[in-house]
Image: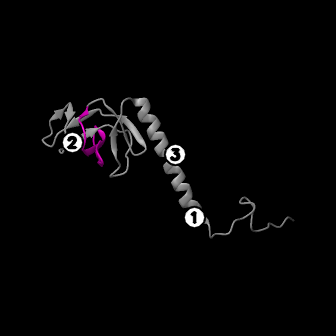
Amino acid sequence: MAPSWKPSWIAGRGPVATVLVQEGTLHVSEPFVCGGHYGRVRAMVDDKGQKVETAGRRHPWRLSACRAYPTRGSSFVAVADEATARQVAEHRRGKQRETDLVKTAKSLAGRPVHADPGRRTSKSCAS
């Protein structure tokens, strides 16, 4: 598990993240979940720019993994298989959607509601 995720972009590699492993060891090709995204660790590099196959604790590691950018600070968790990663990521995205809808509903609560949003407010004259 790595709670610290700092995304960046490197030409030729795509989204790259700096991760701090807090528990266990992270391996190349291991499936993971980060925020509402999932994937497999494609490559890892240490602080000296050397490729590594495993990442231990308490050192920053740069890894190529995601197809998209999770938000900075999202928890990064290695899981048993990619199917589990997909299920967890979809669940997290659903929860995030619900939260966003509640925020939108609260922000619209004081605004007037029109019975027919497609209704025109001005009338045209027919000749």
Mark 2 and 3 residues: CB-CB less than 8 Å, in contact? no
Residue at the spot 15% in from the left edge and 43% down from the top edge: 47
Mark 3 is on which residue type?
Gly
Mark 1 is on which residue type?
Lys
**Marks 2 and 3, the one that precedes in the sequence:** 2
Task: Determine the image quadrant of residue 64.
Answer: top left
Q: As rendered, which of 127 and 10 lies closer to the eye?
A: 10
**Marks 1 and 2, the one that precedes in the sequence:** 2
- Residue 85's disc number: none
**Location of mark 1 (residue):** 106
**Marks 3 and 1, the one that precedes in the sequence:** 3
**Location of mark 2 (residue):** 61
Residue at the spot 79% in from the left edge and 67% down from the top edge: 123
Q: Residue furthest front?
A: 23
Range covered by the magenta-colored residues: 1-27
Q: As rendered, which of 111 and 102 lies closer to the eye?
A: 102
* Residue 36 point in image, percent of width and height: 43, 44
> How many residues crowd around disc 2 within 10 Å: few (fewer than 14), some, or many (20 or more)?
many
- Judge whether residue 7 is colored magenta: yes
**Location of mark 3 (residue):** 94
- Judge whether residue 29 is colored magenta: no
